[in-house]
Image (cartoon, grey):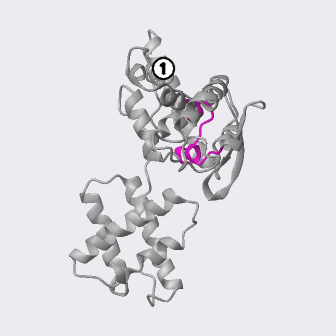
Amino acid sequence: MVSFELDGFVRSLAPDALATRQAYRGDVEAFVAWADRAGVSDPAKVDRLMLRRYLAYLATRRYSRRTIARKAAALRRYFGWLRRHEFIGADPSRRLSAPGGEARLPRILAPSELEALLEPDPGGAKAVTPPSIGARDDALLELLYGSGLRVAELCGLELGDVDLKSRSVTVWGKGGKQRRVPMSGPAVEAVARYVASGRRALVNASTPTGSLFVNRRGRQMTTRDVRRVLDRRSPVPTHPHALRHTYATHLLDGGADLRVVQELLGHASLRTTEIYTHVSTERLVGAYRSAHPRA
């Protein structure tokens, strides 16, 4: 795997895009392992036919078209980097085509699921959670839904990023782009409670200065920590991103302009945001079919 120069490729990616770096490394490592089983350990020996066979192999493994398209994009970027740095003479991935990702609609939380997360049963999991942890969990969940943050954005928040007086939070999104997002009333109250008491009980000498959300060890929370919070609070398996999907869909359901939602979510392209219009339409059609006697 050393001959494939993976470490150099990953270091060339944007340093602040941790999730992207991890995804690209995983996608390329999977290809390298497959190529190694085929007896190829030198990227210069990889040709276009081999790449197409790999994509076909992924299809037989029942990967979705969307996932295969993402992996193909990672390989194009990787082999393009190898060519630019003259590790290979020609780029075998040039114009490599893959099936386009299907328009899979994001999962939106049902009212009962949202209530279980934001207003948990007093006698449930929250009852055995230390008050400091409970206050932290309330605050981060309210921010995920109330402001539509990405989980990585949430974990990177600092105390100075939250302005409770103006009810807003400053977020550093993908590509280092900054945006200012409104906070909901419940989010303002939950964050205020957490900062006033819960956080003080969690910080210690190892806590990074200014980090808003910290885990039980006093360290800055990671995306895995946040997933554990949802595992503990949600009655069904729920990914943190589902709260962001729900936020966007509820805004459109309430009449928000699509471009406003794009700005709030921090999407570079309006096409990315448009998926939520399909979700809203699906919900309307579903409500009509279940409620109208002649539907």
Judge left or right: residue 7 versus residue 257: left
Q: Residue at x 42, y 40 (%)?
A: 227
Image-quadrant location for residue 142: top right
Q: Is residue 61 visible?
A: yes
Answer above or below: position of 227 versus 69: above
For the point 29% across and 65% down, the residue is: 56
For the C terminus, the image quarter is: top left
Q: The disc labelled 1 sits on which kind of residue? A: Glu
Would you identify the image quadrant in which residue 72 lies?
bottom left
Which residue in the structure is indicated by mark 1? 115
Say which of 294 and 160 sits in front. 160
Per the image, label 1 sits on a secondary structure element best described as helix
Give the total of numbered labels: 1
From where the camera sits, is residue 94 visible? no
Q: Is residue 88 magenta?
A: no
Q: Position of residue 202 (x, y in %)?
A: 52, 37
Q: Magenta residues?
A: 142-158
Quarter of the N terminus within the rendering: bottom left
Residue 133 at x, y percent in the picture: 48, 31
Query: Residue at 54% of width from left, 69% of height from top?
Result: 13
Quadrant in the picture for residue 184: top right
